[in-house]
């Protein structure tokens, strides 16, 4: 767990301190290494989710009076998570199509503005991306309400409110986090968000097992 937190801290540090084109390949390599590490952490989280879902399923079959409702909540929340993950993976695939094979320094250093923006406004893909996150936040909130730890985690990592930049200006979330950033930085941001979605679900499932009737 500590390793996973270190990985995410490193990703966050790079993402928040680099807002323009990179000057050297070493920085690109650092992002690529973080991407690999976050994906590995995300895979571990997926395995934990699968294990907890099996535990809840088995419990519901053995003791439906206590766990049947929790089983239904588990499936409902999992479907919401999967819908958002599908949209995040769609954005990542668009970036991969643009940059091609990894290791191409020049392509990784290019921004992905044309994928997500039409000028200063979100493109069709950008609007679809934003809608998917908003839909998740709206539909998941009724279940997260009963589990404060998972709710807080979602609010800290997946809410997309406007951001105040260093100049004191209010900037839309998509613009602040993606406009002008190199492709590799956007990829790491998406991978990190995928891991955030899974960690919210993992935290939700752990709480649901402890409190199956709420």
Image (cartoon, grey):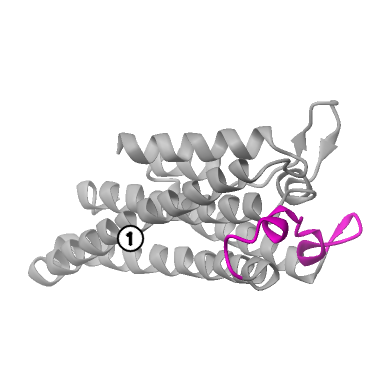
Residue 47 coordinates in the image, percent (x, y): 27, 61
Q: Residue at x 85, y 26 (%)?
A: 167
User: Mark 1 highlights which residue?
Assistant: 46
Q: Quadrant of residue 162?
A: top right
Q: Residue at x 46, y 40 (%)?
A: 8
Is residue 175 in view? yes
Q: Residue at x 30, y 55 (%)?
A: 44
Residue 136 coordinates in the image, percent (x, y): 56, 60
- SS for dot 1: helix
Task: Give 72 or 27, whichever is nearer the viewer.
Answer: 27
Is residue 143 in view? no
Task: Give 95 or 140, whichever is nearer the viewer.
Answer: 95
Q: Locate residue 174 relative to residue 62 in the image: left or right.
A: right
Tally the marks: 1
Q: Quadrant of the N terminus?
A: top left
125 relative to 20, above or below: below
Task: Give 89 or 144, whichever is nearer the viewer.
Answer: 89
Task: Give 209 or 142, whichever is nearer the viewer.
Answer: 209
Q: Locate residue 148 relative to residue 112 in the image: left or right.
A: left
The magenta segment: 101-122
Q: Quadrant of residue 7?
A: top left
Q: Locate residue 133 relative to residue 145 in the image: left or right.
A: right
Determine if the magenta segment contains residue 75: no
Furthest residue in direction right, as rendered: 119
Residue 69 coordinates in the image, percent (x, y): 27, 64
């Amino acid at each position: 767990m500590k390793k996973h937190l270190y990985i995410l801290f490193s990703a966050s540090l790079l993402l928040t301190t680099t807002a323009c084109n990179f000057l050297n390949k070493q920085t690109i390599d650092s992002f690529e290494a973080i991407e690999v590490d976050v994906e590995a952490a995300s895979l571990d989280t997926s395995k934990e989710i699968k294990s907890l879902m099996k535990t809840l399923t088995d419990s519901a079959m053995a003791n439906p009076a206590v766990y049947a409702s929790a089983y239904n909540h588990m499936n409902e929340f999992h479907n919401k998570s999967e819908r958002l993950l599908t949209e995040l993976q769609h954005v990542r695939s668009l970036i991969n199509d643009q940059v091609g094979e990894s290791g191409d320094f020049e392509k990784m250093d290019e921004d992905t503005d044309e994928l997500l923006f039409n000028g200063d406004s979100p493109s069709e893909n950008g609007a679809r991306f934003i809608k998917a996150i908003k839909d998740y936040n709206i539909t998941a909130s009724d279940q997260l309400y009963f589990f404060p730890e998972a709710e807080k985690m979602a609010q800290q990592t997946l809410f997309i409110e406007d951001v105040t930049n260093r100049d004191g200006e209010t900037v839309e979330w998509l613009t602040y986090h993606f406009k002008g950033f190199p492709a590799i930085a956007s990829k790491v941001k998406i991978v990190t968000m995928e891991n955030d979605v899974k960690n919210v679900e993992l935290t939700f499932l752990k709480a649901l097992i402890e409190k199956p009737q709420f």
